[in-house]
Amino acid sequence: MEETGRKPTAHLPLAPDTVVVSSGRPPREHDAPVNPPIVLSSTFHGSGPVVDGDRAYGRYSNVSWDPFEAALAELEGAELPALLFSSGLAAASAAMELVPPGGVLVIPRHAYQGSLVMATELAAKGIFELRVVDIAETEQVVAALAGVSVLWLESPTNPMLEIADVPALVSAAKAANPEAVVVMDNTFATPLVQRPLAWGVDVVLHSVTKYLAGHSDVVLGALVTSNAALRAKLLHHRSIHGGIAGPFEAWLALRGLRTLALRVERSQASAGILAERLLGHPGVEAVRYPGLPSDPGHQRASAQMVGFGSIVCFQVPGGEAAATEVVDRLALWTPATSLGGVESLVERRRRHSNEPRTVPENLLRLSVGIENVEDLWADLSQALGAVQDRLGS
Ligand SMILES: *Cc1c(COP(=O)(O)O)cnc(C)c1O
């Protein structure tokens, strides 16, 4: 692993909320910087043979990626440095190439829309067979695993917040094919809430754009694995397909990561409060949040996660028009796609033409930020009340 800039201590391993602050620091030398520098160099000194993993050239490796790659690996409990990519989908593209030609990819019907579109297009070209499943229905997933090459997991799913029985699905995939690779998109939960490698997942995927960077100012992705052979394939993909991060973006991601624990703590607490209040609001038809005891995923989430994440979804009576009106009436919540930033966002997911038809038209997704929860609730409640009054009159 990379030099962390910490002195070796007797009390390692450190807690995750310490790791986000202390990992990925430059070595402790007199007058050395406390933060890693941004290194702007497209090429590196060398005259010997070049192999994958060598610094050599700015598409293979970059000094500015190292601190973030070391910190994320430590957070996910990986034995090898993470791999930073230009976006979450660039990382997904590398992970999806782990399906061999003619192989089988099993994916949740509510996986991230971009991952689903990518899988559907590759399958349509005949590159592999695609099996789309309801990831919360363990028996249905197990039945689809015959000959599986890659099992793609997401939990909670986007935006339906279904919870997969991850340990059971990992064992079932390995039983169906000992060579099977399990990839898990851990963007929604973050490594502070669940650590998929500990369940036997082979590769963890992140849209770093979201919680890890946390300020809605960069687009980045990452893959994490402890399997050296898989990491070599993924690194090769990055080097050859070229989906690499810029040095400044990598620096911003590490800068954002420093406050991840505080941000997640605050936004999760607020999400729990808002979900409860939405559930009791007469202008709300249904609420999805794994933290609610009434939620179908509650039991699994309680067993698997430390907290329940900061995404809350709900439906309003009155269909698409009423849902859009709620969004338009919100003054503090920002109407925008994406999630995981310090500012609270709201979106009617079906405004995207390729959102699965199983996502209701009147479903709103909240990405709860770190503002004062009473201000967030006051805004939601005025918008819901106004729409409800209009529908009732
Ligand atoms: C946003 C997102 C992605 C894609 O990441 P980009 O950084 O936008 O390319 C993948 N998975 C999930 C769960 C996401 O939310």
Image (cartoon, rainbow, N blue to C red):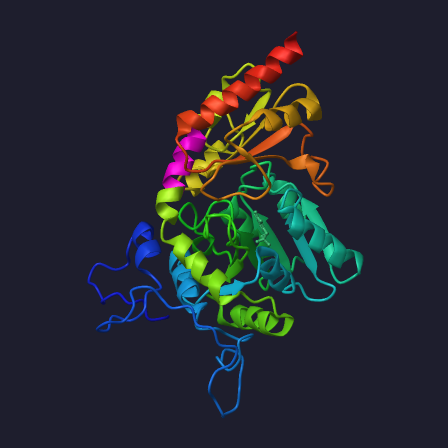
Q: Is residue 293 above or below residue 137?
A: above
Which residue is drawn at the image coordinates 61% and 58% (left, top)?
Answer: 92
Rendered view: 257 above or below 247:
above
User: Where does the image place residue 232, in percent across and percent down from the top left?
Assistant: 54, 73
Residue 157 at x, y = what percent?
A: 57, 42
Quadrant in the picture for the N terminus: bottom left
The C terminus: image quadrant: top right
Image: magenta residue range: 264-272
Residue 177 visible in the snapshot: no
Q: Position of residue 162 (x, y in %)?
A: 57, 37
Q: Is residue 39 left or right of residue 177?
A: left
Q: Residue at x 60, y 28 (%)?
A: 327
Residue in the image at 55% along x and 51% along y: 185
Residue 323 x %, y %: 64, 25
**342 shown above or below 79:** above
Main SS class of the magenta portion in the image? helix
112 left or right, relative to 80? right
Residue at the top extreme of this rendering: 393
The image quarter containing residue 141 is top right
Whether the magenta-drawn stretch holds residue 311 is answered as no
- Between 227 and 392, the one lying in front of the other is 392
Residue 50 sits above or below residue 94 on the image: below
Residue at x 49% of width, y 33% of height: 290
* Badge count: 0
